[in-house]
Amino acid sequence: MNTNKFSIFYKSGGGDAIRIVDKYWQIITSIFDKMSEKEYSNEIDQFHIEMRVDGEYLKFGDTTGCNSLKLFKKKRLITNSISFGEDVYCEEELLSDFLKINLLLAFEQMLDRLDKAKVGIERRQLLLDLTSLIDKNL
């Protein structure tokens, strides 16, 4: 059986206050490693999230939340980004809730896009697995 690859890339604006995000990036990486053990689509190889976090030295200026959904059908890749700043990561409970909600939203948006493009995907199972792992780990 083939598996899909789930990955997350983390772009940080730097500074000491942002270090709390590192902990959550590691947790999400672990969740994605577990998700990568299964196959949810034989038409898409990789599901990728880019986390863009404004920091002390660099502000990306993105809208807070999920904001850059892209499907590269020929490359068998779908991506989305989650952006936020100090207003989110300044309080750990807020950060945790924000990431739980936006990870699920990012994947729902990706799955909607795949449905629209008529790409075969085990939507229900992917969301069940992702929700379960988020609930256990985040």
Image: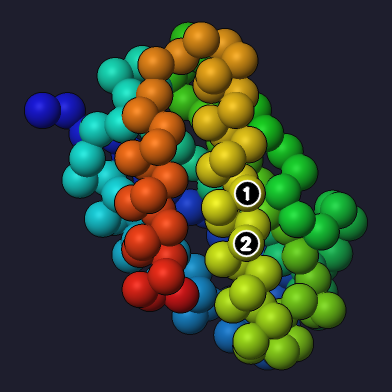
Q: How many marks?
A: 2
Residue 123 percent coordinates (x, y): 42, 33
| Residue 41 picture quarter | top left
Q: Is residue 96 above or below residue 8?
A: below
Q: Is residue 91 left or right of residue 20?
A: right
- Which residue was labeled with disc 1? 105
Which residue type does callout 2 highlight?
Answer: Ile
Judged left or right of residue 128, residue 88 is right
Residue 103 image point, x, y percent: 56, 55
Above/below status of 8 relative to 48? below
Measured in 3D between alpha carbons, the distance from the residue under mark 1 to the one under mark 2, in whole angstroms, is 6 Å
Residue in front for this viewpoint, 57 or 132: 132
Crowding at dot 1, Cα within 10 Å, few <14 / some 14-19 / many 20+, comes out as some
Q: Read off the residue under disc 2.
A: 101
Q: Residue at x 72, y 38 (%)?
A: 68
Viewport quadrant of the N terminus: top left
Q: Tell me the residue at 42%/70% (across/down).
A: 135
29 left or right of 116?
left
Q: Is 98 left or right of 21, judged from the image as shown? A: right
- Disc 2 crowd rating (10 Å Cα; few below 14, some 14-19, many 20+) is few
Q: Tell me the kind of residue under disc 1.
A: Leu
From this view, report whether residue 77 is shown above or below residue 98: above
Residue drawn where x is 43% and y is 45% of the image:
127
Q: Residue furthest left?
A: 1
Are discs 1 and 2 less than 8 Å apart at CB? yes
Which labelled disc corresponds to residue 16?
A: none
